[in-house]
Image (cartoon, grey):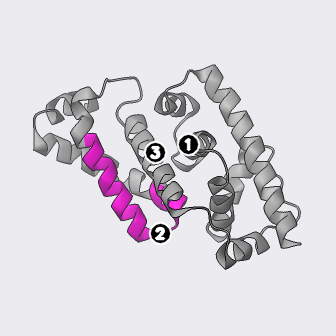
Amino acid sequence: MPFDERQLVERARHDADAFAELYRCHVGAIHGFVFRRTGSREVAEDLTSATFEKALAGIDRFKWKPGGIAPWLFRIAANLVTDHHRRRGRRNGDRARRAADRLQDSVSFETEDAIEAVLDFDRIELVRVALDRLNPRYQRVLSLRYLTGLEHDEAARAMGVNRSLMSVLLHRATKALERELEKLQEERS
């Protein structure tokens, strides 16, 4: 019998075993997303747990949309990551300076491919520092689109916006990220 996530969501509203199955299906992706945004396994575990606690508490209010439950879970996680960064404050210490030192002079972030290319393990800290400097909405749009692996339409649903507005936000957020990465490079000099 093929997996029917919609039926599983409906069952999860009143059946803990069904919710546990949803958890097992999505925990890896949520944890990976949070880890890429925070760089800490401990924080990723805490925020992943909090994501599913909020999802369980709010499952009765979840309204099914194309794309399933994943965009909703990613939105919860993205909001928790934003809250976490706000509480922690911005990083301005030695760690941020070391991350800026890793920026290559020739890196350009004008295309989606360039953004995705920079998200390798060696330079993710630099991108995280730059993302932390953006406003929370830009952080969410970039995170949902590039760090979760959601398609454009899925990320738009997770943001709660239409496809056109998602394109505009993504363009503006990409340009803002590019400016922040350039500032980091100047700070290094």
Highlighted magenta segment, given as a residue range: 34-55
Q: Earlier in the sequence, mark 1 or mark 3?
A: 3
| Residue kind at label 1, given as amino acid type | Arg
Q: Cβ–Cβ below 8 Å for labels 2 and 3?
A: no
Residue at 25% over, 48% down: 53
Q: Identify residue for label 2.
A: 40
Residue at 54% over, 27% down: 153
| Residue kind at label 2, given as amino acid type | Ser
Q: Position of residue 41 (x, y in %)?
A: 42, 69
Q: Earlier in the sequence, mark 2 or mark 3?
A: 2
Residue at 56% over, 62% down: 89
Q: Identify residue for label 3.
A: 79
Q: CA distance from mark 2 to mark 3?
A: 17 Å
Q: Identify residue for label 1.
A: 140
Say left or right for 43 vs 105: left
Q: Cβ–Cβ below 8 Å for labels 1 and 3?
A: yes
Crowding at dot 1, Cα within 10 Å, few <14 / some 14-19 / many 20+, comes out as many
Say left or right for 12 vs 5: left
Foreground mark, 2 or 3?
A: 3
Crowding at dot 2, Cα within 10 Å, few <14 / some 14-19 / many 20+, comes out as few
If the image is split into quadrants, where does the N terminus sit?
A: top left
Q: Secondary structure at mark 3?
A: helix
